[in-house]
Image (cartoon, grey):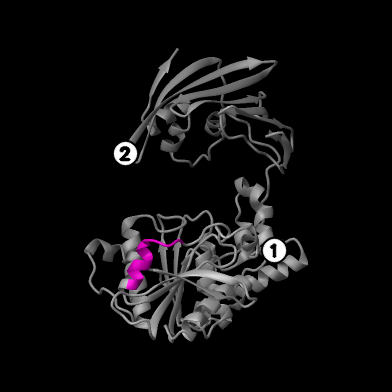
Amino acid sequence: MTPVSYKSKDGLEIPAYLTLPAGMEAKNLPVVVLVHGGPKGPRDYWGYNAEVQFLANRGYAVLQPNFRASGGYGKKFLNAGDLQWGKLMQDDITYGVQYLINKGIADKNRIAIMGGSYGGYATLAGLAFTPDLYACGVDIVGPSNIFTLLESVPAYWEAGRAFLYGMVGDPNTEEGKKLIREASPLFSADKIVKPLLIIQGANDPRVKQAEADQIVIALRDKGKKVDYLLAKDLGHGFAKPLNKKAMYAHAEKFLSEVIKGRYQEDMPTDVKETLQKLMVDVNTVKYEPKGAVTMAKELPKIENMLKAGVTEYDVTLEFNGQKMPMTTTRTVSQKEGNWVVSDKSAGPMGESVDEVVLNNDFKPVSRSISQMGQSIPMVFSDNKATIDMMGQKMEINFEGAFINDGPASDYIVAGLPLLKKADNFISRRLISRRESQKVTLPQKERKK
C-alpha cells in the first residue's frame, strides 16, 4: 500500500492509497476502485485492510480515494462535498482512475468500481454517470434513489435530517429536488450498460432494501445484466462470517469474468449453500412505492397499571470477554397526581439516574437524565419537547401521538393493545416487564 495523490476536476488535491498485487509489475493491471462509506467523516487509512488484500491477492491493483467529504483533512475539505453527490465528489474518484491510466498502471478496459454504503452509491453513480470508464461494478448496500433514502429516515434520526439535506439537497425545495434527481443513479439507469452486482441486507435500517430493488427492476426491465444477492438475516453490511464468505466468493467470480483476475472456484459446502440462499432471481423482484404515513392523533388506551414500590436488579454486561457488573434500582412513586418512575444505575462507570414523570394516561410530563456530573432536563407538552442541554435550549416538535423511551417505556409497550390474532406466546411475553426481564436478560431480580 502506497500513498498517492492527484488533482481532481476543480484542482483540489485528492489523497488516496494504491495497493499493488505482490510480484506483478505496476503496468497495465486490472484495477478495483474501492470507495469507502460515509461519506462525511469516514476515510481510508494506511495499513492492513483485509478487503484490499483479498482483491490484491486476486491480481488487482486497488485504489482507495479519500474523496472530498472524507474525514481527517480539515473542515474545508470535509465540507467541500456538500451538495456534490454525483458531481465533484464523483469526479474525485473519476480523476483517480484517470491518474492510474495516465501512469500506465491501469488497463483502461479492465477497471471495476466497488464499495459499501456511500461507496455503493458511488459504484452506481460511476456506472451511470461515467458509463465508459468502468467495466463493471459491485454495489454493497448503496442507495440508488436519494428521494426514497431521505423518506426512510426514521423518527429517531430527525435531528440529523437538516444535516442530510445539507449534503444532498432539500427535497422540499425545487432546487433541492433538482439536485437530488440529478444525483440519484436510478434516474439514469438507462445509461448503465456494464455488468453490475448488487448486494443488500433485508434488515438494513440505513439503506433500505427498496434502494436495491428499485435499481434491480430498472436494469432488469431494460434487459441489462444485474446480479442480486440479498441476505434476509442481515442489516447494513455483511457481518455474519458465512454470509461474508459467500458474498466475496460470488464477487470474486463476478470480477474475474469481467476484468480477468483470479478466483477460487471451489468453496466449502456451507459457503456454497449460503450463497445459493443469497442469490435472487431478478425476475421475481417487486417494488411498490411507500404509501402516505398517517399519524395517530392519540395513543390507544394503555392497558396497564403502575404500582408504587422499589425493585432492584443485578445486571451483568458481557462483551469482548469482559464482564461488567451493575445494579439498577427502579422506584415507582406518586407526586402531585402524576407517576414518577426513576431508574438509578451503578457500575464501574459511575452512577446515572434517569427519571420520567407521567400522567395517568402514560403521557410524559417531564424527564431528567443525570450522569457524570451533567443533567439534561426535558419538559413535554402535547406537541413539543423542550430540552435544556449544556445551557442551550432545543425544541423538538411532534405530530400526533408519541411515547418516551427510557424509564416506563416497558410499561407502555407492555400495555399497548395487541391484535386479536397475535400469537399467544408474544402476548404472554408482553404482559409485564418482570416476565420479559426473566425471559430475555440473564439477571436476578430481588424485591425489597
Which residue is located at x 59 percent, y 62 percent? 69
- Return the residue nearer the eye: 188 or 6: 6
Q: Point out residue 327 in the picture as x, y percentages from the top left corner.
A: 44, 23
**Mark 1 / mark 2, whichever is N-terminal:** 1
Q: Secondary structure at mark 1?
A: loop
For this view, does 392 lie left or right of residue 2?
right
How far is the residue under mark 1 from the one under mark 2? 44 Å
Q: Quadrant of the N terminus?
A: bottom left
Which residue is located at x 69 percent, y 37 percent? 298
Nearer the observer, disc 1 or disc 2?
Answer: 2
Q: Which mark is residue 143?
A: none
- Return the residue nearer the eye: 97 or 275: 97
**For the view shown, which residue lies furthest in the top direction?**
448
Magenta stretch containing residue 414, yes or no? no
Q: Which mark is residue 169?
A: 1
**Disc 1 crowd, CA 10 A, few/some/many (<14, 14-19, 20+):** many
Q: Secondary structure at mark 2?
A: loop
For this view, does 168 lie left or right of residue 136?
right
Reading the image, the residue beneath label 2 is 321
From what the image shows, is residue 141 above or below residue 103?
above
The kind of residue tagged 2 is Gly
Q: Point out residue 110 in the picture as x, y percentages from the top left corner.
A: 42, 84
Q: Quadrant of the C terminus?
A: top left
Magenta stretch containing residue 54, yes or no? yes
Instruction: Please state the extent of the stretch shown in magenta in the rendering.
Output: 45-56
